[in-house]
Image (tube, helix red, strand yellow):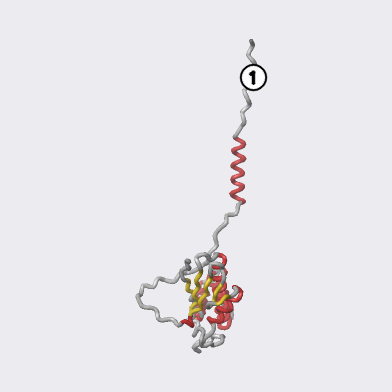
Amino acid sequence: MAKSNRSAPPEVNAGSMADIAFLLLIFFLVTTTIQTDQGLTRKLPPIDKTNIDPPPIKEKNIFTVLVNRNDQLLVEDKLMDLKNLKQAAIDFLDNGGDGTCTYCKGANNVVSSDNPDKAIISLQNDAETSYKAYISVQNELVAAYYFLRDRECMARYGKTFRELEAMYEDPKTKEAQRLKIEPMIKDIQTLFPQKLSEAEPKRN
């Protein structure tokens, strides 16, 4: 009996498929957007190596801000909407209760902060507070400091504090101009020092 003459099955050329897969990989690497975490820019204070006990702080000079696990805002033990936090912080920082602050424009309420140098904002959040709520509260509190600094800087130097900071950090600014701007920035920071204290999150 004669044997059937069957031809071998055709082979698939995988070389072109590897090229296509490589091109697709490059395409996805180029076009894919990688999600990056956002954070807050903060400059930590220098380490204090002295063992001097801090002076006692009056209760009226502390502005307590709490964010609970439900992202609710409690300011001085009272519920408050986030949209009102900035103004409440401004009123506290700019109060000038002891009469020593000649540039303060607040109510001079004797039961509120004595002056901007003694005024401290204490922020505390729950361990289950959302990151979004934490960032939003931080932004409002920092915005209160910048509002007051901008106001006083404009009155003294004809520019906002943010404008001076931008000019100082601009690499195109000449060194002579930067040396002129630096004491202005420090002056405004002294008038309204950012004393924002963050306590450890509460864990229930």
Along the line of sight, which residue is nearer the eye, 75 or 100? 75
What amino acid does circle 1 point to?
Arg
Q: Quadrant of residue 86?
A: bottom right
The answer to whether residue 89 shows anywhere in this view is yes
Q: Is residue 161 above or below residue 111?
A: above
| Residue situated in front as seen by the camera: 186 or 105 | 105
Residue tagged by mark 1?
6
**Front in this rendered view, residue 91 or 203:** 203
Q: Quadrant of residue 154?
A: bottom right
Residue at x 53%, y 78% (from the top left corner): 76
Residue 81 picture quarter = bottom right
Q: Residue at x 60, y 41 (%)?
A: 21
User: Residue at the bottom extreme?
Assistant: 99
| Residue under the image location 47 percent in, 73 percent down | 197
- Count numbered badges in the picture: 1
**Image point 64% across, 21% down: which residue?**
7
Q: Can residue 171 be seen at all in this image of the molecule? A: no
Q: Is residue 137 above or below residue 156?
A: above
Q: Position of residue 11 (x, y in %)?
A: 61, 28
The furthest residue to the top? 1
Quick check: 181 left or right of 49? right
Residue count near mark 1 (Cα–Cα under 10 Å), binned few <14, some 14–19, many ≥20:
few
Residue 13 drawn at (x, y percent): 61, 32
Tag 1, which secondary structure? Answer: loop
Residue pushed farthest left? 51
* Quarter of the picture holding the N terminus: top right
Image coordinates for residue 202, horizontal then vertical, percent: 48, 68
Q: Looking at the picture, how far across and down is residue 108, in whole percent?
A: 54, 88
